[in-house]
Image: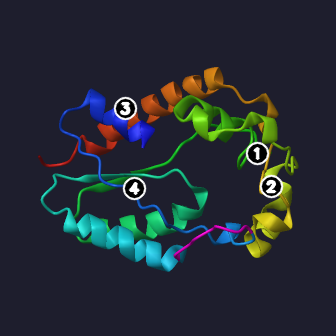
Amino acid sequence: MALCARLATANNNILIAPAIAIAASGEHDGFAGTLSIGTSALTTVIVEVVRSASWATGVVLVNSHGGNVSALRAAISILQMEHHQVTAWWPQLGVDTNDAHAGHTETSLLLAIAPEAVRMELVEVGDERPLITIIDELQSHGVASVSPNGVLGDPRTASAAHGHELLTLLTTQLTDHVKRETATWVF
């Protein structure tokens, strides 16, 4: 939501809809508290939400979770075939492939956005192997199969300063994406 707020602040024509709080997170089902509706249900939810926004000129879907990508791609395909003006965006950080979840990058972002939610005295290193070497097991058996604490990376070096740098980079990426993708939309 922080990125959406930054985008809307720069453009008065943008409205922010509520986030879809429960999405496709089945890979985290080894951890208590995880809720997931799966890819198929999320695809349907996205399609129906965008259809219901027919009053809007178009919809930009901002994604922050890798588990949602398949649903987003499927929904976009359906919606574009129906001639909805819709695009999806997710972060492109070029992050080290051993910093995929709750490591340095994500912890830094959270320190910048909601520092009160981070308890640095409790952070733990997780699996630091390159994602490419564990991706099959991760996809087949979930995050818990490769990282008992759910961390893929090392959050101990995270900082709010780095989080603010990342937010600036991501805001630029999102703003550029919206300008590029909406340039041909009929307003």
Give how far apart the Cα atoms at labels 3 and 4 are: 15 Å
Task: Name the residue carrying label 3.
Answer: 6
Q: x and y percent of residue 133 in the render?
A: 86, 57
Disc 4 marks a residue whose amino acid type is Ala
Residue 19: which disc? 4
In the rendered image, the vertical position of residue 155 relative to residue 166, given as above or below: below
Disc with the residue nearer the chain's start (2 vs 3): 3
From the image, state whether disc 4 or disc 2 is nearer to you: 4
Q: Quadrant of residue 145?
A: bottom right
Tell me: 186 left or right of 29. left
168 or 16: nearer the viewer: 16
Q: Residues within 10 Å of mark 3 (few under 14, many from 20)?
A: some
- The disc, 3 or 4, on the residue closer to the chain's N-terminal end is 3
Q: Quadrant of the N terminus?
A: top left
Give the crowd class for mark 4: few <14, some 14-19, many >=20 residues within 10 Å.
few
Q: Nearer the viewer, mark 2 or mark 3?
A: 3
Q: Residue at x 84, y 60 (%)?
A: 134
**Quarter assignment of residue 25:** bottom right
Which label number is shown at residue 97? 1
Task: Give percent across and percent down for residue 53.
Answer: 20, 62
- Amino acid type for the residue under numbered disc 3: Arg
Query: What secondary structure do most residues of the magenta stretch adopt?
Result: loop
- Residue denoted by label 2: 132
Find out whether residue 35 is within the magenta segment. Answer: yes
Q: Amino acid at mark 2?
A: Ile
Q: Are the two marked residues, 2 and 1, in contact with CB atoms closer than 8 angstroms?
A: yes
SS at circle 1? loop
Does label 2 or label 1 sit earlier along the sequence? 1
In the rendered structure, which amino acid carries the disc numbered 1?
Answer: Thr
**Sequence-first tag of 1 and 3:** 3
Mark-to-mark CA distance, 4 and 2: 30 Å
